[in-house]
Amino acid sequence: MHIDSIVNGIVLDHIQAGRGMQIYKALRLDELDCVVALIKNVKSQKMGRKDLIKVDEMIDLDLDALGFIDQNITINIIKNGKLAEKRVLQLPEKLVNVIKCKNPRCITTIEQEVDQVFRLIHESPPLYRCAYCETAYTGPYQSGKN
């Protein structure tokens, strides 16, 4: 398999195997007009297997969504064919419109124009709570869902 190298763009590396499509959807990469490559189950000495996403254009990334889905992702910024910057993610303290409250009585369920706001309560294991009704959300990394 041959995937062209990127001249100017972004490489999302060290994605937990199987999470690439979830990230692809969360970042709405299907709406881009540039080349996007999602490579699944790449062999990795560090991780065993991993997913990788290459975007052949500079785009704004939702770092909170990425950190929430998989805080171990490395973001590589490529300029003129070379690695210009490497960013490491952290678990976000606050999430806005990344996840939805599952409480049917929450104001965010009733009033759809209200932002979905969650705050990090506990880091290990990660636990978020709705800012309005305190409903807990443990995240996809806890349940193993993609």
Image: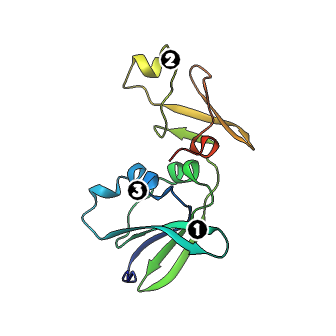
The quadrant holding residue 8 is bottom left
Give whichever of 116, 44 is nearer the camera: 44
Residue 49: numbered disc: 1
Of the image marks 2 and 1, the number of the one nearer the N terminus: 1
Q: CA distance from mark 3 to mark 1?
A: 18 Å
**Residue name at image x 64 percent, y 55 percent:** 90
Of the image marks 3 and 1, the number of the one nearer the N terminus: 3
Mark 2 vs mark 1: in front? 1
Circle 2: residue type: Cys
The secondary element bearing badge 1 is classed as strand
Quadrant location of the N terminus? bottom left
The quadrant holding residue 59 is bottom left
Q: CA distance from mark 2 to mark 3?
A: 29 Å
Give whichever of 4, 61 is nearer the camera: 4
Mark 3 vs mark 1: in front? 1
The secondary element bearing badge 3 is classed as helix
Of the image marks 2 and 3, the number of the one nearer the N terminus: 3
Residue 106: numbered disc: 2
The secondary element bearing badge 2 is classed as loop
Mark 2 vs mark 3: in front? 3
Image spot of residue 106 (x, y percent): 50, 17
Circle 1: residue type: Arg
Looking at the image, residue 33 lies above or below residue 8: above
Residue linked to disc 3: 24
Query: Along the horizontal axis of the image, is 129 left or right of 27?
Result: right
Query: Along the horizontal axis of the image, is 125 left or right of 30?
Result: right
Looking at the image, residue 96 lies above or below residue 59: above
